[in-house]
Amino acid sequence: RMTPHPSVAPGAPAADRRLARDRAESLADSIRRGSAMLDSGQKALLAMIFDQGITLEQIAQLTGQHLSTVSQMLEWDL
């Protein structure tokens, strides 16, 4: 769970909190729609990058693939 930015903390004006909540919900919806379009390989690649902090270079070394091949896996027509 994310910690709210100070501008949208409980003491911030209600309008600021509403705007921040609406933007966060919109972003979450976009991420859900985008991730539904990914295949299992793309999801695994993103998990390695964001959850484990592995670089594309490290993924290429681990998988034995060329760096450009790994990089191309991140190219989507969304």
Image: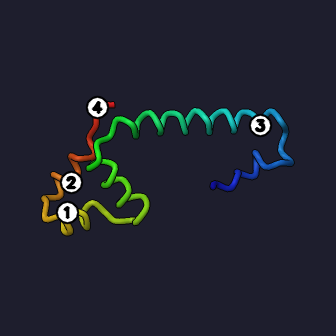
Q: Secondary structure at mark 4?
A: loop
Q: Nearer the viewer, mark 4 or mark 3?
A: 4
Distance between mark 2 and mark 3 Cα atoms = 41 Å
Disc 2 + disc 3, Cβ < 8 Å:
no
Question: Quadrant where the C terminus lies?
Answer: top left
Disc 2 + disc 1, Cβ < 8 Å:
yes
Q: Nearer the viewer, residue 14 or 33?
A: 33
Q: Earlier in the sequence, mark 1 or mark 3?
A: 3
Distance between mark 2 and mark 4 Cα atoms = 16 Å
Q: Residues within 10 Å of mark 2 (few under 14, many from 20)?
A: many
Q: Nearer the viewer, mark 1 or mark 3?
A: 1
Q: Earlier in the sequence, mark 2 or mark 4?
A: 2
Q: Position of residue 25 (x, y in %)?
A: 61, 36
Q: Secondary structure at mark 3?
A: helix
Q: Amino acid at mark 2?
A: Val
The numbered mark at residue 16 is 3
Q: Amino acid at mark 4?
A: Asp
Q: Nearer the viewer, mark 2 or mark 3?
A: 2
Residue that mark 4 sits on: 77
Q: Earlier in the sequence, mark 4 or mark 1?
A: 1
**Please, is residue 75 above or below residue 58 in the view?**
above
Q: Earlier in the sequence, mark 4 or mark 3?
A: 3
Q: Position of residue 2 (x, y in %)?
A: 64, 54
How many labels were placed on the picture?
4
Residue that mark 2 sits on: 70
Q: Earlier in the sequence, mark 2 or mark 3?
A: 3
Residue that mark 1 sits on: 60
Q: Residue at x 55, y 39 (%)?
A: 28
